[in-house]
Amino acid sequence: MKMQWPYLIPEKKIYTMTELQSTNHSTDQPVNQSPNHPINQSITPLISYALHLADNALLLGQRNAEWTGHGPILEQDIAISNIALDLIGQARNFYQYAAQLTNLSINQSVNNSTALTTTENTLAYMRDAKDFRNCLLVELEKGDWAVTVLRQFFFSNCQFYFFKELRNRKDTTLAAIAEKSLKEVTYHLRWSAEWVIRLGDGTEESNTRITKALFDLWPYTGELTSNAVYETILSKEGIAVDLNLIKQQWTDKTKEVLTAATLQLPENYTMQNGGKEGKHTEHLGHILTDMQYLQRTYPGAEW
Amino acid sequence: MNSDKQQILALLEQVPDPEVPVLSVIDLGIVRDIKIDEDKIEVVITPTYSGCPAMDVISMEIKMILLEHGFKKITVTTILSPAWTTDWMSEAGKEKLRAYGIAPPNPTRPVCDTRLFAEEEAVQCPHCQSYNTRVVSQFGSTACKALYQCNDCLEPFDYFKCH
């Protein structure tokens, strides 16, 4: 069954047991499968951008939440879970905006405003891996504590400078989310940078682990500061942040922290990319399976 | 009209934050506006943190209490900008926090910055009033709190962190 994004499911539909048990979930069929249908034509660069920002936050939030109950010590279990919660909150804000834009866009093109609605939940739970636009870095497995804190540092370091710029851009909704998120990201950046230093400049074991994490993760950092097509289009309109603007700040801060951690900045690496355009590692499918299972099986289920 | 607004404000003072129940939504400073247009009422709220899980409950409780008091056509709108700050917390709210055993946010100080291993601000222990305290973690039992410990009475306590 080939499904096209956006998956539009009737809100609050009550499923009968027969429907739920049937192998062919006819009710799950997307309304329109043709890529030429207006619904699929209606994904604007702005929707892509909002989804990209949402997917980044959702995936890293979900990865960090895998630590909940498993953190190395109680205080840090709480810390990483707090960060996860902040990220899920950011993701919700971006998804709500993406849903609002999608509904507007669809209503304009198919003139059918009542039957079907895209929501933050359908966007998070009902899209396939290829429709996700997150950076590859955030979908990688959670790894050990070294991988977790180093990834968080790379990501928060990017978000920090990114949100500082985005809060001054033209789109007022994105700017408001950026203004709100920046305060939280400041804590994330400080926390993760301190942990990178603690591990790098710590024991032989911790240094070995974070050195390995550094070489494993480094090829995925290039994507954080390189523009996708929709970012190039939108930055010309004054809506998106041209990532070239923050690249130097990101690199300087990274060097500063890695140096304090007695680690060397890797050089001459081929960078992996493609996540922002829907080309992902195998890890994304697995995390989506975990995360989407319930809503895929019982669409619209609520607590 | 104005008396309606006064009455709504008074009712909202009875709506507690589900996670810190000594504080009302007014004490917290998350109610940003009350708009009255004939029989339509819009209450504008803002979250303390993006991921604050209490927002949905707060929104529902606001609707419930207004419905119970004869108001109809109520909408609760969430805005993100300007972003919430602890400066909006009422003085009464800060006193209630202290009495509850949570150190209230210090009056105006710079919010967390990116300096690493920076010296922490002096936070007063809500139990023995000592300033000889240390931060255990910037992340506490909820997004809005940090975890501290008093070096004098040795009690751990929550600090409602500046934001």
Image (tube, coloured by chain):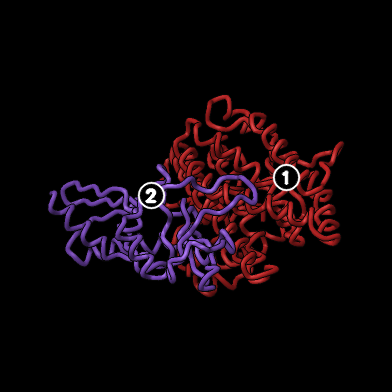
State the SS at label 1: helix
When asked about the image quadrant of residue A19, the answer is bottom right
Which residue occupies the foreground of this view, A283 or B100?
Answer: B100
Give the side of residue B44 with respect to residue A12, left or right.
Answer: left
Marks 2/1 in contact by CB < 8 Å: the verdict is no
Q: Position of residue A194 (x, y in %)?
A: 68, 52
Task: Name the chain letter of the residue that bears numbered label 1.
Answer: A
Q: Residue at x 57, y 34 (%)?
A: A45
Q: Residue at x 35, y 54 (%)?
A: B89
Task: Name the chain letter of the residue that bears numbered label 2.
Answer: B
Q: Position of residue A186 (x, y in %)?
A: 57, 47
Q: Position of residue A211 (x, y in %)?
A: 84, 52
Q: Residue at x 79, y 53 (%)?
A: A200
Q: Given the current orientation, which residue lies at the most extreme top position?
A: A236
Q: Position of residue A101 (x, y in %)?
A: 47, 41
- Chain depicted in purple: B
Q: Residue at x 63, y 53 (%)?
A: A191
Instruction: Give chain A's shade.
Output: red
**Is residue A207 in view from this perspective?**
yes
The three-letter code of the residue at mark 2 reads Asp
Asked whether the residues under marks 2 and 1 belong to the same chain, the reply is no
Residue B3, placed above or below residue B135: above
Which residue occupies the foreground of this view, B66 or A268?
Answer: A268
The three-letter code of the residue at mark 1 reads Val
Q: Where is mark 2, residue-wise?
A: B87
Which residue occupies the foreground of this view, A115 or B53?
Answer: B53
State the SS at label 2: helix
Give the side of residue A48 with respect to residue B83, left or right.
Answer: right
Q: CA distance from mark 2 to mark 1?
A: 32 Å
Please rate how many residues cluster around mark 2, counting C-alpha atoms within 10 Å: few if below 14, some from 14 to 19, many from 20.
some
Give the side of residue B60 with respect to residue A88, left or right.
Answer: left
Q: Where is mark 1, residue-wise?
A: A257
